[in-house]
Amino acid sequence: MTLPTRAVLLEQWRALYDILTDHATVRLVHPQPGSPDMVFTANAGLVRGRLFIRSNFRFPQRRKEEPI
């Protein structure tokens, strides 16, 4: 199996970003030292109407993301 090149990955990311911004407001968050999993948007929280309930992460590595 051949891994995709950086150029292909960036192209795919941009395509996803463009689709998302067609349907929602997207705010990019800069990576933070000591928070390697910030690239994943899953499990950040739950939105219902105007209410956002942020996650309380189980593992210490993810807990640093909560205030960010």
Image (spheres, rainbow, N blue to C red):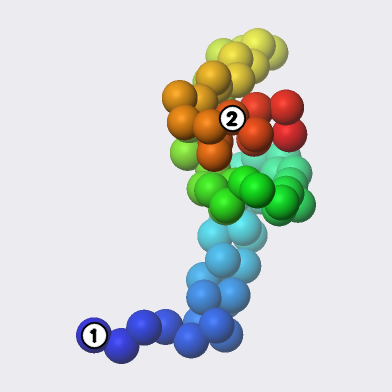
* Residue at x 65%, y 34% (from the top left corner): 64
For the N terminus, give its image quadrant.
bottom left
State how far apart marks 2 and 1 are (Cα): 34 Å
* Residue at x 55%, y 83% (from the top left corner): 6
Disc 2 designates what residue?
63
Give the mark nearer the N terminus: 2 vs 1.
1
Q: Point out residue 53 in the picture as x, y percentages from the top left corner.
A: 60, 15
As drawn, is 67 to the left or to the right of 22?
right
Tag 2 secondary structure: helix
The quadrant where residue 62 appears: top right
- Establish if 43 lies above or below 2: above
Tag 1 secondary structure: loop
Q: Can you name the residue that lies furthest to the left here?
A: 1
| Mark 2 burial class by Cα count in 10 Å: few <14, some 14-19, many 20+ | some
Query: Residue 1 shows which numbered tag?
Result: 1
As drawn, is 62 to the left or to the right of 68?
left
Looking at the image, which is closer to me, 60 or 40? 60
- Establish if 10 lies above or below 57: below
| Mark 1 burial class by Cα count in 10 Å: few <14, some 14-19, many 20+ | few
User: Does residue 28 show up?
Assistant: no
- Establish if 18 lies above or below 46: below
Q: Point out residue 38 in the picture as x, y percentages from the top left corner.
A: 60, 47
Residue type beneath disc 1: Met
- Establish if 27 lies above or below 3: above
